[in-house]
Image (spheres, coloured by chain):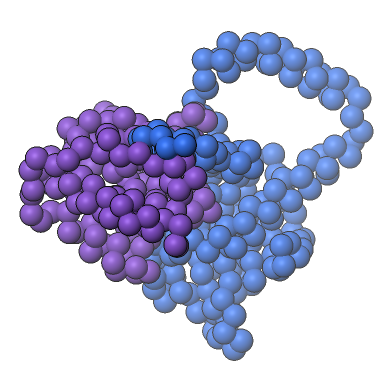
């Protein structure tokens, strides 16, 4: 049965939906500044009270290991996030072999990019950079290439997320077929995805 | 910042440009990040402003990959043909719309999106895209001819 072009186009696009996962990621990028819908605003006092009650129970009864679990949870979220960004291959905003040029371009970061001891200049070449987000905060993605192997990696730098107590140990995992390492250096959270 | 309904709306717009949901999400994510770090103090119409961010980001993304898209966008500022036939009297099978949209270029899909989904007038689209009204009229005329060609020849099934 034929319909007007207008109705057909309307139906085609209105049936297109963001998945729950992607919607959550976009909200996360927007951080705490998310606009609430009227329904959300109406419900928020109830939710708030419920959360206070649940939080009180957690404070009273949770084991001391909660801190460790929480840290692992944030850590896993960050690992998944940087791997996701890496596999999306969203392109560079600036292409340059100069780390200083990347620093200059990413001027809106609220931290200073650092030279990591893990990526010595005589072994790695900078290819460029772009803004990204980690845990809803503006972060830097620097694409680097290993001079010997030619392997191109995504190198991330971010402020350490709130509630994340860093330690000196490097974490390494394989997620979605890629290798990801996360560590802390000079007061920043760093990650590299190969 | 944007509520879920806004994000869904912008996602649909991104799909109209890319005609691919994964690319549309990447485009939307890039645009949200760009919006968040822009100076919003002088922005009076966030919706229009954000639409333009998505559009410009789309053009940037495809500038290197597909020069034809750019030519199609640049081509909009050419001859103005008046008295276009309307799009209102075109009829189509719903299951043919995806194939039809795939045959159109991004600027044509964008125009259809604003006309059909957002139900904007030519003047509203003109302001939103910062494109002269006459150019849009010309585009609608050419789009109508393209649609007639596809629909009259019945070649939507042929792929």
Residue B66 placement, left or right of A83: left
How many numbered tags mark residues here? Answer: 0
B71 above or below B141? Answer: below
Q: Residue at x 83, y 42 (%)?
A: A69
The chain in purple: B
Along the line of sight, which residue is nearer the eye, B81 or A65?
B81
The image shows residue A150 at horizontal and vertical percentages of: 57, 84
Q: Is residue A112 visible?
A: no
> Within the image, what quadrant is residue B77 found in?
bottom left
> Within the image, what quadrant is residue A4 found in?
top left
The image shows residue A182 at horizontal and vertical percentages of: 69, 60
A149 above or below A110? Answer: below
Q: Quadrant of the C terminus of chain B?
A: bottom left
The chain in blue: A
A100 above or below A20? Answer: below
Q: Residue at x 38, y 58 (%)?
A: B155
Q: Residue at x 64, y 42 (%)?
A: A21
Residue B81 placement, left or right of B17: left
Q: Residue at x 35, y 39 (%)?
A: B91
The image shows residue A176 at horizontal and vertical percentages of: 71, 62
Along the line of sight, which residue is nearer the eye, B66 or A22?
B66
Along the line of sight, which residue is nearer the eye, A69 or B137?
B137
The image shows residue B78 at horizontal and vertical percentages of: 10, 56
A64 above or below A155? Answer: above
Q: Quadrant of the N terminus of chain B?
A: top left
Along the line of sight, which residue is nearer the eye, B85 or A44?
B85
Q: Is residue A161 visible?
A: yes
């Amino acid at each position: 049965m034929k319909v007007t072009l207008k109705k057909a186009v309307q139906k085609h696009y209105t049936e297109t939906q963001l998945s729950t996962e992607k919607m959550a990621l976009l909200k996360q990028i927007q951080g705490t500044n998310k606009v609430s819908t009227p329904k959300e605003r109406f419900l928020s006092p109830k939710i708030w009270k419920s959360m206070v009650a649940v939080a009180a129970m957690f404070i009273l009864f949770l084991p001391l290991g909660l801190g460790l679990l929480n840290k692992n949870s944030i850590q896993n979220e960050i690992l998944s996030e940087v791997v996701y960004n890496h596999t999306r291959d969203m392109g560079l905003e600036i292409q340059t072999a100069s780390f200083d040029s990347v620093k200059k371009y990413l001027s809106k970061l609220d931290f200073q990019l650092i030279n990591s001891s893990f990526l010595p200049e005589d072994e790695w070449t900078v290819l460029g950079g772009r803004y990204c987000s980690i845990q809803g905060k503006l972060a830097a993605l620097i694409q680097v290439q290993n001079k010997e192997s030619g392997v191109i990696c995504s190198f991330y730098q971010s402020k350490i997320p709130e509630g994340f107590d860093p330690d000196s140990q490097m974490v390494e995992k394989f997620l979605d077929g890629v290798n990801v390492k996360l560590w802390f250096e000079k007061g920043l959270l760093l990650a590299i995805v190969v | 910042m944007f509520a879920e309904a806004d994000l869904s709306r912008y996602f649909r717009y991104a799909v109209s440009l890319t005609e691919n949901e994964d690319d549309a999400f990447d485009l939307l994510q890039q645009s949200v990040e760009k919006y968040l770090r822009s100076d919003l103090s002088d922005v009076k119409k966030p919706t229009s402003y954000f639409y333009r961010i998505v559009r410009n980001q789309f053009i940037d993304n495809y500038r290197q990959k597909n020069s034809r898209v750019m030519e199609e966008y640049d081509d909009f500022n050419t001859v103005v043909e008046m008295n276009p036939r309307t799009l209102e009297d075109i009829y189509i099978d719903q299951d043919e719309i995806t194939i039809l949209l795939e045959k159109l270029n991004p600027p044509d899909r964008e125009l259809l999106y604003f006309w059909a989904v957002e139900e904007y007038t030519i003047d509203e689209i003109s302001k939103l895209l910062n494109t002269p009204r006459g150019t849009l009229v010309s585009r609608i005329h050419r789009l109508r001819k393209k649609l007639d060609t596809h629909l009259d020849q019945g070649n939507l099934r042929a792929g």
